Amino acid sequence: MNTAVVSNILKYTVNRCLRAQNVIKIAAASAPVFKRDVHTTKPNNDLMEFFDVKKNWGETNIRVGRGWRLDELRIKSNSDLHKLWYVLLKERNMLYTMEHECKRQTRLFPNPERIDKVQESMDNIETVIRERNVAYYKLETGETGERPVEDVVNLFGLPEKYEKKEHFIPKFMNTRWVKSYYEHGFVNSAAVKKFMRLYKEKQYNVERKARNRDFNHVQHLLKRFPNMDMEALKAEYPDVDIEKAKRTKKARGHFMPKY
């Protein structure tokens, strides 16, 4: 009887130990493993992350490379573009901070074209991402997936591109918008008509001055170079009447006229 009791106690103890070991193994397997990749950049988690490295402080010329091109970005994966975007965003914030600090201290900001190169790279990344999105949506849905654009007339009576967006109230039910736009008619109002009349007059004057400027320039060219190629002159100034310019007094030089 005592032997059976001792045997049962041993079995119970062994089962409890094995069960505890299994629980420990499962917990260890399910616990997140924190792994740090190899980085060559020194970690910086304070406000100095918004400033350039100290060796560039006081420099008048910092050698930098060019921006990222479209052909180079098209061969990269989406994850690489995502990482590169935040690298460029961090670089742009740093450059803006350094530029503001240089202005505050009345100092010369070295190589301001760095901001343009970073902005060019970010614009190219957006272009590549938009190309991929358009290709994906055209393949899946047959549409571009971009926000639809409509040609409308603004409050000044000028045509513009309007990007559609969602509203809580449909256009035909929005009485406040319909009343102000259709009944009063911003486009047909006296103020808009006056603005459009003056705007067209200004455009006409700009075009007229450009035509007169080209015509006078052609006359001086004919005066200085009477043997010039007329076909090339017509190709360069298609809106100018070459035959009329030949007959003017300004086109005649101090020699016997040839035309």
Image: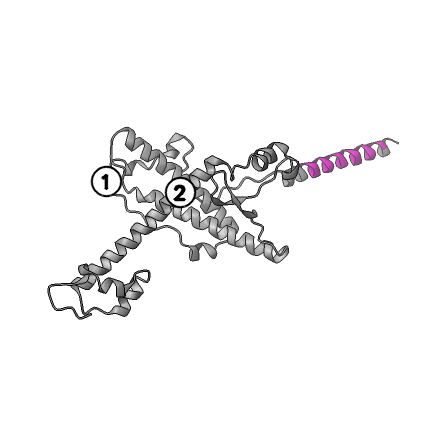
Q: Is residue 239 left or right of residue 196?
A: left
The residue at which mark 1 appears reads as: 60
For mark 2, give the secondary structure.
Answer: helix
Q: Residue furthest right?
A: 1
Q: Main secondary structure of the magenta part?
A: helix
* Type of amino acid at the residue the image marks with label 2: Tyr
Q: Is residue 42 visible?
A: no
- Residue 110 occupies which quadrant of the picture? top left
Residue 7 magenta-drawn? yes
* Type of amino acid at the residue the image marks with label 1: Thr
Coloring scheme used:
one colour
Q: Residue 158 appears at what percent x and percent y?
A: 47, 43
Name the mark on residue 214: none
Q: Residue furthest left?
A: 254
On screen, 223 above or below 14?
Answer: below
- Magenta residues, as a range? 5-24
Quadrant placement of the C terminus = bottom left
Name the mark on residue 199: 2
Identify the mark nearer the N-term, 2 or 1. Answer: 1
Identify the residue shown where x is 31% and y is 31%: 101
Q: Residue 47 appears at what percent x and percent y?
A: 39, 30
Q: Is residue 161 left or right of residue 8?
A: left
Identify the residue shown where x is 33% and y is 47%: 205
